[in-house]
Image (cartoon, rainbow, N blue to C red):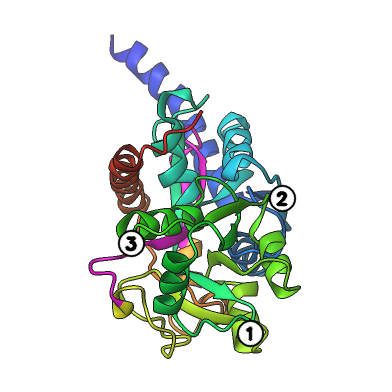
Amino acid sequence: MDRRLARIGCALVPAMFMQGAFAQAYPVKPVRILVGYTPGGGVDTAARIAAQSMTEAWNSQVIVENRPGAAGNIATEITARAAPDGYTMVLCNIGSHGVTPARFGPKLTYDPIADFAFPARFGGMPNVLMVHPSVPMKGLRDFIAFARKHPGKLSYGSSGVGASPHMSIELMRSVTGIDILHVPYKGASAALADVLAGHLEASVGNFAGAPLNSIRSGRLRALGITSAQRSTQMPDIPTFRDQGIEGFDVTGWYGLCTQAKVPGEIITRINTDINRMLGTGQALRKRLEEQGIDIAPATPAEFAAMVKQEIAKWTKVVRDMKLEGD
C-alpha cells in the first residue's frame, strides 16, 4: 500500500508542477477580449484600454475582437464555448451578465454563472441621456414634460433591446408614465452618431468613451445620469434622482469573464495582475477614470457574487415590466 501511494504521489508531483509552471508562463500566445458591441461605445472603449495595459504588462499581445449583436449575447456565447485555457475572455457588463440573463433566462444556450469564471472587475459607471445641442431641452424635467405633452413624438437610440442603456430608460418610463419611442441599434456608437448628426432627438449610453468625450466637447448635451451619485468626472451633470425620480439608480459595470473550467492558477494570475494595474497611480486606473469609470477591483469570488445579485435584481425588474425576451 505504501509503495502504491508513493507511486501515485510521484505521478501527481509533475502534473502539479506543470500546472504551476503554465500559470507562471501565461500568457504564451495572444489573448483575445471579445466585445459584444460595435467599436466606439463604452464597453468597447473599456476593452481597448484594458487590452493596451495588459499588453504592456504581459509583454504579450491582447487583442480586442468586436462581435456585435443580440445585446452582447453573441460575444458572451462565443466565450462560453471557447477552449478553457484563459486565452478567450469577454468584456462582461451589466448587459451581458445582468439584463440579458434576466430577459432570456433558460432560453440562453449557456449558464451565465455556472459556465463562467470572473477573474477581474474594473469598476462601474452610469448611463447618460444625451441630446443634440439644438434640442431646446436643458434637463430631464424638460424631456419628461415634452414627452407628456407630445406622447409618442420623442425618440431615443440605444445599443440594443435589453442592454443596460435601454433598460435605464424603460425603468424611467415606467416610473414617469411617458410614451417615447425606442430605436435600437447594433451598438452605442451608431445611436450616438445619429444624435450627433441631428437625425435623432436623444440617445442613451454608457457614460464612458464617446458619450463623455462628446459631452465634454459640447457636441452633445447631457440631460442626466442614471447612477445614485454624480460622476466625479463631470459633477455638474445632475442625476435622475436630482431631477425628481426618487430612488433611481442604474449603475453599469465592466469586468473580464472567461470559462468556468479555466485553471484556478490562471484565474488568480489574471486577477492579481489586473488588480495591480488598477492600483493608485497606475496607467490602467488613470485611463479608465478618464473615461468616467469609478474603479472598484474585486476578487473572483466577490465579482461572481455581485453578478448573481445583478441577475436577481434585473430578473425582478424584467418581470415587473414584462420585458422578457422572445
Element type at mark 2: strand
> Depth-wise, is mark 3 or mark 2 nearer the camera?
3
Tag 1–tag 2 contact (CB < 8 Å): no
Q: Residues within 10 Å of mark 1 (few under 14, many from 20)?
A: some
Residue furthest right as drawn: 197
| Front residue of this view, candidates 83 and 220 | 220
| Front residue of this view, candidates 324 and 100 | 324
**Residue that mark 1 sits on:** 133
Residue furthest top as drawn: 1
Q: How far apart, in angstroms, are the residues tagged by discs 3 and 2?
A: 35 Å
Residue 278, position as x, y percentages in the image = 47, 72
Amino acid carrying label 3: it is Thr
Q: Is residue 251 magenta?
A: yes
Q: How far apart, in angstroms, are the residues tagged by discs 1 and 2?
A: 30 Å
Tag 3–tag 2 contact (CB < 8 Å): no
Amino acid carrying label 1: it is Pro
Residue 266, position as x, y percentages in the image = 51, 46
**Residue that mark 2 sits on:** 66
| Front residue of this view, candidates 179 and 36 | 179
